Image: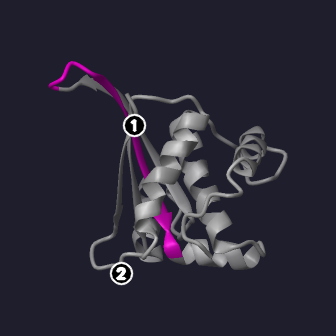
Amino acid sequence: MSNRIAVDCEEGMDVPSWIDRVEPFAQKVLARLDIEGWELSILFCGDSFIQKLNAQYRDIDSATDVLSFEQGDEYIDDEDRTWFNAGDIVISLPALDRNAEDFSVPRDEELKRLIVHGILHLDGMDHSDNSPEQEMLQFQEHLLAGFTGDKVCGD
């Protein structure tokens, strides 16, 4: 059994040329974490969309780069396989671009970072702030180091 990952864009948004490489990368991350039988979605959006979600669910009325919404329920499909509905990851493409510029990293590296970050949240990890000393963020960077040859958006 592997994992089921749905990748999409906010309605009306131009679909990035690299979107087909997101699911295989997320599969590799889950495999590295030894996770099987998960279902999750990754949605790419604009700042206004993620700002509304951030305001509604976190009472923070500003755009952010990535949000994760844990579901945590299991179900058995028609073939008697058990699936874990891990949840949803939402990534702002404008924030991705800003982060890459602000942190002086390639856009591809930042995209991988945001995907890994979202998956780690769905796996129950958390951090109290964005300081590099946070255990989750240290683990995230360690995990990312293993994917240096993988290209998602290619730039």
Residue placed most toward the observer, 27 or 98: 27
Q: Hey, which residue is sitting farthest front in the picture?
A: 149
Secondary element under disc 1, as helix, strand or loop, is loop
Report the quarter where the C terminus lies.
Answer: bottom right
What label does residue 14 carry, if any? 2
Residue, x 57% and y 65% (percent of image)? 65
In the image, residue 116 sits, relative to residue 36, either above or below, namely below
Is residue 39 found left or right of 30 in the rendered image?
left
Number of residues whose C-alpha sits closer than 10 Å to that of mark 2, classed few (under 14), some (14–19) or many (20 or more): few
Residue 42 spot, x, y in % from top left: 41, 55
Residue 55: tell me if it is visible: no
Residue type pointed to by label 1: Asn
Residue type pointed to by label 2: Asp
Residue, x 52% and y 52% (percent of image)? 25
Q: Main secondary structure of the magenta part?
A: strand
Residue, x 54% and y 59% (percent of image)? 66
Number of residues whose C-alpha sits closer than 10 Å to that of mark 1, classed few (under 14), some (14–19) or many (20 or more): some
Q: Earlier in the sequence, mark 2 or mark 1?
A: 1
In the image, residue 152 sits, relative to residue 32, either above or below, namely below
Residue 53 spot, x, y in % from top left: 41, 61
The answer to which image quadrant residue 113 occupies is bottom right
The answer to which image quadrant residue 56 occupies is bottom left
What label does residue 3 carry, if any? 1
Residue 149 spot, x, y in % from top left: 68, 58
Q: Hey, which residue is sitting farthest top in the picture?
A: 80
Residue placed most toward the observer, 128 or 107: 107
Give me the C-alpha separation between circle 2 and circle 1: 26 Å
Residue 30: tell me if it is visible: yes
Which portion, as a residue range, is magenta? Answer: 78-93
Residue placed most toward the observer, 51 or 75: 75
Residue, x 42% and y 67% (percent of image)? 19
